[in-house]
Amino acid sequence: MDTSVLAEGFVSPGPGDFEYSPLFGEGTFFTKPMLIIVLGTLLVAVFFYLAARRATRVPGKLQFAGESAYGFVRNSIALDSIGKEGMRYVPYLATLFFFIAVLNVAGIVPVLQFPATSRIAIPLFLAVISCIIFNSIGIKRQGFVGYFKAMMFPPGIPWPVYILLAPIEFFSTVIVRPVTLCLRLTFNMFAGHLVLLLFILGGEYLLRDYGGPVGVVAGSVSLLGSIVLTFFEGFVQLLQAYVFTLLSALYIGGALLDEH
C-alpha cells in the first residue's frame, strides 16, 4: 500500500478534537472540560481538607503529604519570589498551583484524557484573577495615582522618553502580563495534547488499517513513542503550573515594592 492511501485514510487530529458535545445531550451545557474542572476543584479541596482536618504534632501520611505540598509552594515560590511578605499570599498561590496542576494532568489520566487548561477561557480567568490581585496590592500600597505613576514614570529618565515609555509600561503591566500568562499555559497544553493524539491515533491507524511490515513497525514505534511522550507531557504539565504560579508570585512581589 502506498503513502497516498495513508494520507486519504488517516485524518490528523486538530482543533476539532478540543470541542466536546454536552454530556447529557442537546439542550444541556455540561461538557467534559466542565466535568474535569469540577472534579479538579473537588480533588484539591477534599485533599487539603482531609490533610488538615485532624492535624497533629506527629503528622500521619496524609497530613505529611498535605504539609509537604503546601510547604513546596510556600518555600519555593512565595518566600523565594516575594520574601516574608509573601506568607499572606501562600493560600492563593497554593490553590492556584494545585488547581492548574490537576487540570493539566487530567490530560494524561485514563478516561479523562483532556487538559482542561487547553481551553483558553480557564487560563484567561485565572490570569485575570492574578492581574487583579497584584494591581490591587500595588494600588493599596502606593495609592492609585502613586502606583500608576511609579509604573509609568520611573525616575531618572529624560522626560521626552516618557512619551513612549509611559504607555508601553502601562500596556505591559495591565494587558501583556495576563495575556502572556494565559497564552503560555493554553498553547503548551494545546500543543502537548495534540502531539499525543497524533502519536496514539497515528500508531493505531498504522497497526490496524495500514498493515504490512511497514505499518506494524511504524505503528509500534509511534505507540511506544506515545508512552515516552506521556511521561514528558506529565513533566511539562507540572512545570507549566509552576511557571504560572511563579510568575503570579513575581508580579505580586513587584507590586509590593515602593517603586517599579
Image: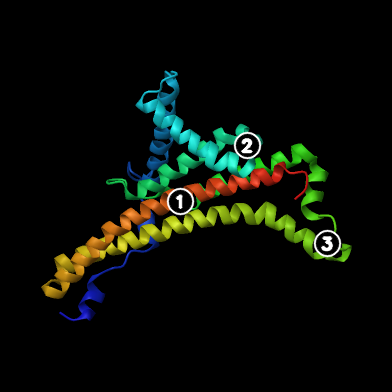
Q: Is residue 45 positioned above or below 182 on the image?
A: above
Q: Quadrant of residue 139?
A: top right
Q: Quadrant of residue 15?
A: bottom left
Mark 2: amino acid: Gly
Judged from the image, the secondary structure of the residue bearing numbered disc 3 is helix
Distance between the alpha carbons at the discs numbered 3 and 2: 32 Å
Which is in the foreground here, disc 3 or disc 2? Answer: 2
| Residue 45 in sight | no
Q: In the picture provided, is 64 more to the left or to the right than 72? A: left
Residue at image coords 27%, 60%: 226
Q: Do the residues labelled 3 and 2 touch (CB within 8 Å)?
A: no
Q: Is residue 185 positioned above or below 195 on the image?
A: above
Residue at image coords 45%, 19%: 57
Residue 75: horizontal and vertical position, in percent?
54, 38
Residue at image coords 28%, 63%: 199
Q: Is residue 59 positioned above or below 123 on the image?
A: above
Mark 2 Cα within 10 Å, few/some/many (few <14, many 20+)?
Answer: many
Q: In the picture provided, is 148 more to the left or to the right than 222? A: right
Mark 1 Cα within 10 Å, few/some/many (few <14, many 20+)?
Answer: some
Q: Is residue 237 positioned above or below 49 on the image?
A: below
Is 26 or 73 nearer to us in this picture? Answer: 73
Kindly identify which numbered label has been placed on residue 86: 2
Mark 3: amino acid: Tyr
Q: In the picture provided, is 248 more to the left or to the right than 231? A: right
Q: Which residue is tagged 1?
A: 239
Kindly identify which numbered label has been placed on residue 162: 3
Distance between the alpha carbons at the discs numbered 1 and 2: 21 Å
Is 141 or 103 nearer to us in this picture? Answer: 141
